[in-house]
Amino acid sequence: MGIITFFRNASPVKLIILCLLIGLGSIFLEKPFPNIFLLLRLFVFILFIYSVVKFFKSK
């Protein structure tokens, strides 16, 4: 439950920074672990869309 409440309570800016950090970190996993790389990229995309929607809902 702690992870879900973090995503609900976090500001959109923090979520976008988290997306950037995960996205940059996943670049190093591209060659040795391509499946994990794709999973992380999908997670970053979903999290980015969620944070953009949350940002525009708050305004």
Image (cartoon, rainbow, N blue to C red):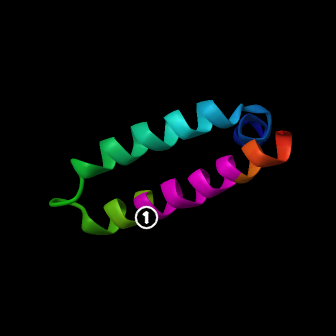
Compared with residue 9, is residue 52 higher up or lower down, i.e. above or below?
below
Residue 11 placement: quadrant: top right
Q: Magenta segment range?
A: 41-52
Q: Quadrant of the N terminus?
A: top right
- Quadrant assignment, res 20: top left
> Which three-letter amino acid code belongs to the residue tagged 1?
Leu
Q: Residue at x 83, y 47 (%)?
A: 57
Instruction: Report the quarter where the C terminus lies.
Output: top right
Does residue 49 appear to the left or right of 53 in the view shown? Answer: left
Measured from the top left, where is residue 10 in percent x and y? Answer: 72, 32
Residue 44 on the magenta span: yes
- Percent across and percent down for residue 47 are 60, 52
Q: What secondary structure is the stretch in magenta mostly built from?
A: helix
| Mark 1 surroundings within 10 Å by alpha-carbon count, few (fewer than 14), some (14 through 19), many (20 or more) | few
The residue lying furthest to the right in this view is 58
Give the camera-side residue of 9 and 16. Answer: 16
In the foreground, 41 or 36: 41
- Measured from the top left, where is residue 19 in percent x and y? 49, 43
Q: Residue at x 49, y 54 (%)?
A: 44
Q: Which residue is mark 1?
A: 39
